[in-house]
Image (cartoon, grey):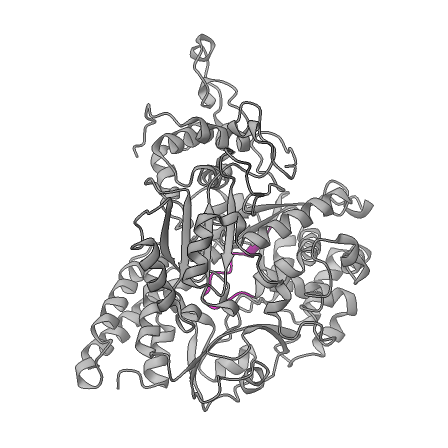
Amino acid sequence: MDLRFTDTKPTDEERAAVDALLGPPLNGWDGGERTDADLRWAHGGHEARDHRDQLLPALHAVNDRVGWLSEGALDYICRRLLVPPAEGYGVATFYAMFSVTPRPARVLHICTDLACETRGAAALVAGVESRLGPAGQARDGVVWQSSPCLGLCERAPAALLIQAGLPTGPAQAGDPAAAHPACPAIEDRGPGAEPLVSGRGGVGEEPAAGAPDRHATAVLAPATAEAVAAATLAPEAAPDEPEESSAVPQAGDPALVLLRRVGVVDPADLDDYRANGGYAALRRAFALGPAAVIREVLDAGLVGRGGAAFPTGRKWDATARQPERTHYLVCNADESEPGTFKDRVLMEGDPYALVEAMTIAGYVVGAHRGFLYLRGEYPRALRRLEHAIGQARGRGLLGPDVLGQGFAFDIEIRRGAGAYICGEETAIFNSIEGRRGEPRSKPPFPVEKGLFGKPTAVNNVETLLNVLPILEHGAAAYAATGTGTSTGTKLFCVSGTVRRPGVYELPFGATLRELLALAGGVPEGRTLRAVLLGGAAGGFVRGDELDIPLTFEGTRAAGTTLGSGVVLVLDETVGLPRVLLRIAEFFRDESCGQCVPCRVGTVRQEEALHRIADRVGAEAAADVALLRDVGGVMRDASICGLGQTAWNAVESAIDRLGAFE
């Protein structure tokens, strides 16, 4: 692509997909046909450029409809948004779920990351390859590719099939979809606005004979080669996913706090949610006022649950105090850390709780608009949240006058497209704004200058949901659970070679041994070799170190990290060098390439691990020394947490587990 627009034209389908999102072009400067009047004056300017944040939704719209992004489609999107084509191309090629080369409408993603690696991903890949051919080569209208973690670790090995086609909402006039009306309605929010309730990403009804394919997804977990091959023939006929409560072995336990409604309340029923305590916290927030809510959160000791453990009340207070008139709230639901799936379970099983928690956060920090940045690989969570937001808006729980309190707040979902780095709090801003998802230098910090250059509070799903019990029961009651510096409960994502994988909720201070006992331990006859805490960016502990207290300070004192709550169990059947190599491959693939230490260091780390995969002792010594040097440079000089933590797991395996000795 060039800096200049080309004469390449989009197809009718591509044009219809973009126009359904942005509205029809108003003139020749806006992507329409040029007329004599257009030659007399120019339209657009700042007003058109202000819509650049619609770039990622527009790329999704075409990819959902056609399956890939052609030069003509990119050119048309960039004309509509006044984005230089070279920049549009840079954004499109940044995300793993997009393709700028032709491919079939059906794309199969096979997870080969850590949890799936321990549960038979290699055999699944071999079976799929024998039926569908090598990865990346189209056969019979489908192409498959290896994928990083799909967030389905409790049901590993996992696969996700995406079929491009007509959207499942009503078609615009002149759209080819108009001849084939669809099921749910899309709320019309006007040109330039992304539909908040769209049906995209859902499994459509089986099309009538002769009708074009509709956009559909099929999640297969645990996946077999036979089931995957059958799903590629008819994604809409694939079996439904199990209930979200199947991911919560403790479901129904009255002692649960964050998970108490999962499997108990119908996630589609707002009345059921309210009958089980829903919206009591928001009413109390309105009664207290923003300053008092911040004080409650501070007194409760709530800290971020994404890994950084920054005090939530301090973040909210700093955002609220900024003199700027416009503030924003961003919910980071792009949980892409290998082995993490807790936020997915919360969003699928208790979506109204997230809507309520975001509304409270928006009220407290002075934001009237919230963005929910959701992983592109979570189709069921997308459907549940779209429905919940639509229902809340229809009942006055979102919109211009929430609960009649004179407070305006609304939520817009933005889908990610397969980029781990977008979980970083400033990279997520760039992604929403229609730029490459690369981290920004700090300061300024997000509370000062975040999304669209305005003060912004960023919290993940688990952190936000903790605000509800704080307001329902009071800060003192909340802080009575856990330890003095790690209050409340924590969600742990247990996966790997363990009998009962799933999301577990325990008070801070419980030990790793207690958690593994709840999960049933390793299968009978096997020996626990190691546990990876915190995911690929975390660290290993040995099987004789299970009495580590699961708190932020306890894991830090033990020389590891709690991170986002990943607990990946490895027995003696799992090859440690292969696990380390997969971690290195992950960081190499996910590095955004912005800074040299990370861009080069992750490659050198992977190369060294390839060389010593089958070596020990003196044969591996030189490369182990190189790994230490490279890891130290990445930790000290990388611009963001990805490069700073890319060496953690490898270092802990060498020092703690004696890898390569």
Residue 337 among those drawn in magenta = yes
Q: Residue at x 45, y 11 (%)?
A: 35
- Which image quadrant for residue 6? top left
Residue 562 among those drawn in magenta = no
**The C terminus is located in which quarter?**
bottom left
Relative to the observer, which residue lies in front, 548 or 42?
548
Relative to the observer, which residue lies in front, 271 or 400?
271
Dominant SS type (magenta)? loop
Number of numbered markers:
0
Please state if 475 lies on the left or on the right of 28 as rendered: right
- Residue 445 vertical placement versus 571 (above, below): above
Q: Residue at x 40, y 66 (%)?
A: 113
Please state if 492 lies on the left or on the right of 10 as rendered: right
Relative to the observer, which residue lies in front, 16 or 229?
229
Q: Position of residue 133 (x, y in %)?
A: 30, 54
Residue 314 makes an appearance in the image = no
- Residue 422 vertical placement versus 302 (above, below): above
- Which image quadrant for residue 199? top right
Please state if 421 lies on the left or on the right of 634 as rendered: right
Q: Position of residue 502 (x, y in %)?
A: 56, 72
- Residue 4 vertical placement versus 465 (above, below): above
Residue extending farthest to the front is 209
**The N terminus is located in which quarter?**
top left
Relative to the observer, which residue lies in front, 260 or 302?
260
Q: Position of residue 86 (x, y in %)?
A: 33, 36
- Residue 404 vertical placement versus 261 (above, below): above
- Which image quadrant for residue 475? bottom right
Q: Position of residue 219 (x, y in %)?
A: 51, 56
Residue 652 makes an appearance in the image = yes
Residue extending farthest to the bottom is 544
First to last magenta residue range: 329-341
